[in-house]
Amino acid sequence: MGLTLTIIALIVAVPLGGLLVLFVEKSKNDQLIKLLLAFSGGFLLSLAFIHFIPELYENSKVHVGFYILIGFLVQLFLEFFSGGIEHGHTHATKGAKIPVALVIALSAHALLEGIPLGTQFGGATIAISHDHGADHGMLLGILFHRIPVAIALATVLIASKIEKRKVWLLLGVFAITTPVGILIGLTSANAFQFDFDIILSVVVGMFLHISTTIIFETSENHKFNFIKLLTIVGGGVLAFLIH
């Protein structure tokens, strides 16, 4: 997918999630979030193990394991402020109050995700630059996860009783963060003497944290619902089929 279509898809995914909140009943929204998250969790986890980690260890010159661990911890830190909305937690703030920390944490996460995509469009030599399957897989993984997160964010913002125009403004801010990350990666890919495999490894660590948490938290009473199990497996199979 070209740069323009990639940016459009990433932006459109967020208001799409917001519209689903407005037009779908809350109980159905909750179920939709769980199923979409289960699919994205299976997809991201499989993508990390099948494509990203082998590619990084084979081709990268950086200490891959260290930076993957850093990414895992970075995501843990961000979720302290986001409240775990990345994997379906939708706790509203009390009163008409903008959840600033949540929006900043989600935006920081989305910004980091976009940088590895941008470096590839910018021609940087990173571990997966030759693997179009992994390249497309990263975009699909971000999109699959972006829609349920947008639904959860819109749910929290609406439940927080803030003005509707502020809800859409904040969703707009979130919508442009990954494209901004792409532009940062695009413009800096060949401008700085920096190994962008570091950023990719950090993002993979974040993927690992998100996907494993999603998979464990999509179960009821620590037991997998059969439909959710099939959804997770479906996401994993799709990641396996990407070449």
Image: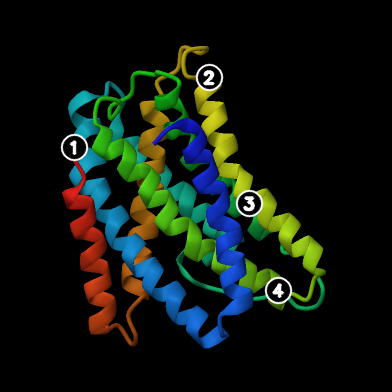
Name the N-terminal-most of marks 2 and 1: 1
Name the N-terminal-most of marks 1 and 4: 1
In terms of secondary structure, where does tag 4 sit?
helix
Residue 163 left/right relative to 148: right
Label 1 neighbour load within 10 Å: few <14, some 14-19, many 20+: some
Q: CA distance from mark 3 to mark 4?
A: 15 Å
Q: Which residue is mark 2?
A: 188
Q: CA distance from mark 1 to mark 4?
A: 42 Å
Which quarter of the figure is the C terminus placed in? top left
Name the N-terminal-most of marks 3 and 4: 4
Which residue does the image show at 45% across and 17% down from the upper left?
A: 194
Which residue does the image show at 80% across and 78% down from the upper left?
A: 95
Residue 111 appears anywhere in the view? no
Amino acid type shown at disc 4: Ile
Question: Which-is-in-front pick, marks 2 and 1?
Answer: 2
Q: Position of residue 75 (x, y in %)?
A: 47, 52
Q: Which residue is mark 4?
A: 158
Q: CA distance from mark 2 to mark 3?
A: 22 Å
Q: Which residue is mark 3?
A: 174
Residue 35 left/right relative to 27: left
Q: Which residue is mark 1?
A: 54
Q: CA distance from mark 4 to mark 2?
A: 37 Å
In terms of secondary structure, where does tag 1 sit?
helix
In terms of secondary structure, where does tag 3 sit?
helix
Amino acid type shown at disc 1: Pro
Q: CA distance from mark 2 to mark 1?
A: 25 Å
Q: Is residue 21 above or below residue 242?
A: below
Amino acid type shown at disc 3: Phe
Label 4 neighbour load within 10 Å: few <14, some 14-19, many 20+: many
Which quarter of the figure is the N terminus placed in? top left
